[in-house]
Amino acid sequence: MEAKAANLLKFLSSRHQLVIPIYQRTYSWTRSQCQQLWTDIVRVTSDETVQAHFIGSVVYIQEGIYQITTIPQMLVIDGQQRLTTVSILLLALANTIGDEEKYSIDRATLFAIYLLNNEMKGDQRYKIILTQSDKETLVSLLEKRDLPASFSQRIKDNYDFFVDSIQKSNLSIDEIYQGIGKLLIVDVSLDRQNDNPQLIFESLNSTGLDLTQADLIRNYILMGMPPSKQEEIYTRYWYPMEQRFGHAEYAKLFDRFMRDYLTIKSKAGTIPNIDAVYNEFKKYIQGKDITEVVADVALFSRYFVRLAFPERNEDPLIRAIMENINTLKVDVAYPLLLEAFDDFERGGLLTREEFIEILDLVESYVLRRAIVGIPTNSMNKTFATFKRSIDKDDYLNSLKFAFMKLDSYRRFPRDEEFISEFMLKDIYNLSQRRNYLLSKLENKGRKERVNIEEYTIEHVMPQNENLSAQWQRELGDDWKDIQIRYLHTIGNLTLTGYNSEMSDRSFLEKRDMTGGFADSPLRLNRGLAKLDRWGREQIEQRATSLAHMALDIWKFPNLAEEIVARYEGMPEVNGDEYSLDQFEHLNGDILEVFETLRKRILNLDSSVREEIKKLYIAYKTTTNFVDIVPQKSRLRLSLNMRFDEINDPEGKCSDVTDKGRWGNGDIEVGVSSIDEIEYTLFLIRQSFEKHTDEIAV
């Protein structure tokens, strides 16, 4: 490696061609970054005490590594954004001068020295060669040709910005040129035989400056390949993938996609951190054929895009369900759905109907949990590990059984729990989900769908806290309690195109007016059209009716008894069974203390479950919050917290950090009598609440 300070204009004036490799991302400097460069140039021009302004490094590989050409070519590893921007600025300056000769620098000289290799032909004529549409856009501006159909908006906008800035500037052309002449770079020249461009690239971008995980992965794949192979892989797989995601969404969506892709490929269903995708990809690709991996990534990207952009699915039913899933904002389900997509389209393991049923299952699972109020942040792990429960010879049944067996905070709410919560849930404040929910109810069984976005949500019993005397009489003496309890519930909500006309009118007026419930084409209003009054009884009856309809829309994954029995009888991985009988000291007074404490722990919350291990008894929600080891004269408890987190005014806890105790956590406390249970519960509850709070974050 050779590094030295260099004047940027002198660097550009050398006889060479700067080539941006195809694996580099497209030009991405925004107006604000160009504004900053322009401000810096104006400052160094106006301040005679400033002799130079450093704008960063330019790292490149010297000749002999790209192809044999008449003019030396240098592959730019780092610095393409600033090189491209300064080239655009010089072009704007040259075109602003025109053919006038009243300045110390003229248009022809700017082109000949900094923008073109005049003696060369074809692509070798240009000082800098960009990638894809960037190249055609810059060449069109240089040659004063019409822009291509698919031109780079960034290059065009920034060119226009510099032309406008030059024309409006109080500085002369000569002063601006002199300001550009004060720009310095660090000129870093690499030798492929002695330097590793990829390691240097990572080092230069270790802060992640302006680079996404997608950029790093693409460069890692392509940088080490011969140029012909780079061209083949990029053109065949990578560039179409970038186009598929769309330029504006590419970086954000691709990082998410690669996290999901690596989750699928992990046998354990491990989910990489979004900022560690690049490092995980490097581990994953070791020992594999790079071309095969890139082809597989490109294939799965097709599935991901069809999940993220449902309109790209030709099948109208699949498209509609994916729109619903996206409305529910459950992209955490993508690892399961990506694999199912592949098994449906390529593997032939799922029929269309089975794939649709899986989509329905995911939709139902998420909606039921939202209604019941189960925290969502554990779902990413749930969906990531489903693959371990799927028998692909009995795909749908095994997946249904896996859904059925989820428990505690991961559970698929059963009908009784769902219907109870559905009737009393504040549906109105579910934000975007309320429209989704009402649309599903209204359109159940319809072939000609009603677009509910054309309607407004109507509270049959008005929202006004000061209900009219007529409404108060209709609701009865406890009208205020009824309004508070039922106002935003499903029983009191409907749709109308006459919301402003209905306002706070009485029920009968809302029913009989033009466009009222009796005059409505909507199914949600059919029952209302037949009623003569509106009160607690009617709200509850309507809620019950809609709740039973909801059961048929968002179904629980029921299986025939013989299928359940077959799967219940299958041994689980690491499924050794243990019982309390195995603990030799769990008898007499210690057994009594244990049973009392056990009952109190399980009563902390319905999400708490007990697991009997070989050496201890665990109580968990997201993970173990307390473990109990029965001993001869006491119960030894491990609390899953750091010792400095516990509030222990009586000083009962011991710090067992790194002491190798059975159980989870750094805190140990003993219990030997029933009298000590109340204080022990005070300590246990702190660990329980810590892990419950982690779910809710």
Image (cartoon, rainbow, N blue to C red):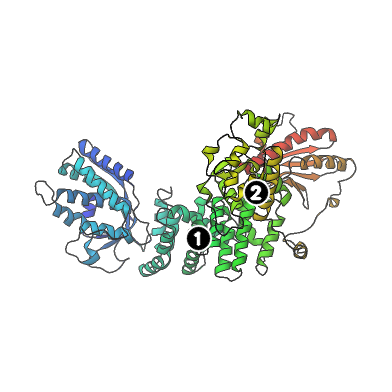
Residue 306 got which mark? 1
Reading the image, the residue beneath label 2 is: 369
In front here: 440 or 218?
440
**At 44% across and 53% down in the image, what residue appears?**
251
Q: Determine whether 348 is above or below 368 in the image.
A: below
Q: CA distance from mark 2 to mark 1?
A: 25 Å
**At 23% across and 43% down in the image, what residue appears?**
165
Q: Are marks 2 and 1 in contact (CB under 8 Å)?
A: no
Horizontally, residue 117 falls left or right of residue 238, namely left
| Res 638 seen here | yes
Horizontally, residue 415 falls left or right of residue 187, namely right
**At 13% across and 49% down in the image, what residue appears?**
105
Residue 237 position in % (x across, y down)? 43, 66
Q: Earlier in the sequence, mark 2 or mark 1?
A: 1
Residue 246 position in % (x across, y down)? 41, 57
Horizontally, residue 57 falls left or right of residue 499, namely left
| Res 653 seen here | no
Horizontally, residue 38 falls left or right of residue 353, namely left
In front here: 131 or 645?
131
Q: Amino acid at mark 1?
A: Arg
Residue 555 position in % (x across, y down)? 67, 56
Categorize mark 1 by other alpha carbons within 10 Å: few (<14), some (14-19), many (20+): many
